[in-house]
Image (tube, rainbow, N blue to C red):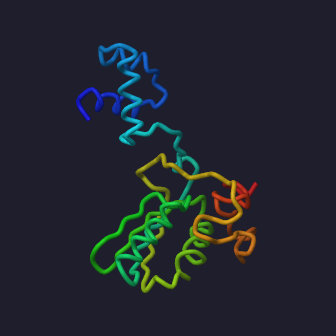
């Protein structure tokens, strides 16, 4: 990324709906040149412009989950699974006592409990787990909450309608047709 590409990123970071003509004016280049730069940045996967959900305004809560799993290979495989979970905002393999670190957000503590107790704790790969529950995150305020209720089976392989917490404490996985909304509506 050169200086102009970085400036495009800064402009779109401030307002993702900025028109290409305004970007071109700000950079002092032609509209076609600005569009070409933007398309190249998006095409190479260097930037992505999308809508994000304000989780602080919605009163979301958070959890940090540190896992010790049997091997680094299993940690990497689980990282791929958790990356598809709508409630995961951060996942990384790590070194030290724990080899997998997750940051989760949810609309309430019951939804976090359902995710942790029904999805994470039962995994046979998990040898040890440390969970810290938190309030609404100070940062990031906006996240890509993967709300896409089109499937019956969640990305983790669970089916909400078979869960004992569904409809009681949990409104379902946001990636499934069973999701009842943030307030259960």
Q: Is residue 44 left or right of residue 56?
A: left
Locate the N terminus and report the quarter of the image it occupies: top left
* Quarter residue 5 falls in: top left
* Quarter residue 165 falls in: bottom right
Q: Is residue 174 left or right of residue 135?
A: right
Is 20 above or below relative to 181? above
Which residue corresponds to the image point at 39% horizontal and 84% vertical from the top-left?
70
Viewer-nearest residue: 94 or 35: 35
Percent of width and height locating residue 116: 54, 74
Which residue corresponds to the image point at 37% horizontal and 65% vertical from the top-left?
92
Locate the C terminus and report the quarter of the image it occupies: bottom right
Is 164 above or below relative to 45? below
How many numbered discs sit on the rendered protein?
0
Q: Is residue 25 left or right of residue 48?
A: left
Which residue corresponds to the image point at 46% horizontal and 31% vertical from the top-left?
16
Q: Is residue 126 left or right of residue 93?
A: right
Which residue ends up furthest to the left in the rendered image? 3
Percent of width and height locating residue 122: 56, 82
Percent of width and height locating residue 33: 35, 19
Percent of width and height locating residue 4: 27, 26
Which residue corresponds to the image point at 38% horizontal and 24% vertical from the top-left?
36
């Amino acid at each position: 990324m050169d200086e102009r590409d970085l400036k495009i990123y800064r402009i779109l970071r401030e307002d993702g709906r900025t028109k290409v003509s305004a970007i071109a004016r700000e950079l002092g280049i032609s509209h076609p040149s600005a569009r070409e730069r933007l398309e190249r940045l998006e095409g190479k996967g260097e930037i992505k412009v999308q809508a994000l959900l304000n989780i602080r305004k919605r009163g979301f809560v958070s959890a940090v989950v540190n896992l010790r799993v049997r091997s680094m290979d299993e940690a990497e495989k689980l990282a791929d699974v958790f990356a598809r979970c709508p409630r995961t905002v951060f996942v990384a393999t790590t070194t030290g006592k724990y080899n997998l670190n997750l940051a989760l957000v949810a609309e309430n503590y019951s939804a976090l409990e359902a995710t942790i107790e029904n999805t994470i704790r039962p995994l046979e790969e998990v040898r040890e787990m440390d969970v810290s529950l938190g309030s609404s995150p100070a940062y990031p305020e906006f996240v890509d909450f993967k709300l896409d209720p089109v499937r019956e089976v969640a990305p983790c392989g669970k089916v909400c309608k078979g869960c004992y917490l569904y409809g009681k404490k949990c409104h379902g996985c946001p990636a499934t047709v069973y999701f009842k909304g943030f307030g259960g509506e």
